[in-house]
Amino acid sequence: MYRNPENVGPPINSELGEYCPFISLDGSYLIFEVVDKPGGFGGGDMYISLKQSDGSWGNPKNMGETFNSSRNDCYPCLSPERQFFFFMSDRRTRNPRKSEQKLNYHDIVENAQKKGGWDIYWIHADALKSLLQQ
């Protein structure tokens, strides 16, 4: 039997937009996109939060330039054998937005569909190892 959905709460959820969650098979970490967070690399960056010993989620950490670009990076997932990390990005979109321009999710998707800028990227899962250390 399923239970009703519950808000994960802080420190994962904030006043910003959090999207595209991926939880590891063992439940030890959560990767998700945060849009327009100050200090980020682009419009939407991927962040990682580690499960703490008390069962709570740790403070989200930006996954850095290995995974994030000056554009939107999101939809994280691991291959079934956990060897490759896949994600989507519009980093090759031809017309970058002005830094002060705020886009909502609908605008991002509509813009990408018009320009064909969203692509799927992959990297060996070993790139996650340094992020998984507490």
Image (cartoon, rainbow, N blue to C red):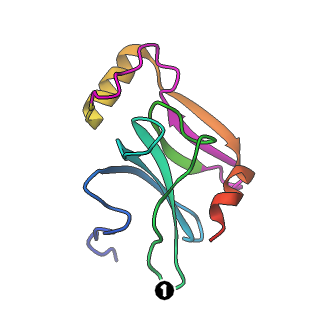
Q: Position of residue 131 (x, y in %)?
A: 63, 59
Where residue 108 sits, quadrant-wise, is: top left
Q: Secondary structure at mark 1?
A: loop
The question of residue 94 being in magenta is answered with yes
Q: Position of residue 82 (x, y in %)?
A: 69, 55
Q: Main secondary structure of the magenta part?
A: loop
Where residue 123 sits, quadrant-wise, is: top right
Q: Nearer the viewer, residue 79 or 106?
A: 106
Q: Is residue 122 left or right of residue 54?
A: right
The residue located at (56%, 32%) in the rendering is 120
The span shown in magenta is 78-101
The residue located at (31%, 69%) in the rendering is 9
* Disc 1 crowd, CA 10 A, few/some/many (<14, 14-19, 20+): few
Q: Which residue is mark 1?
A: 54
Furthest residue toward front: 39
In the rendered image, is residue 83 in sight?
no
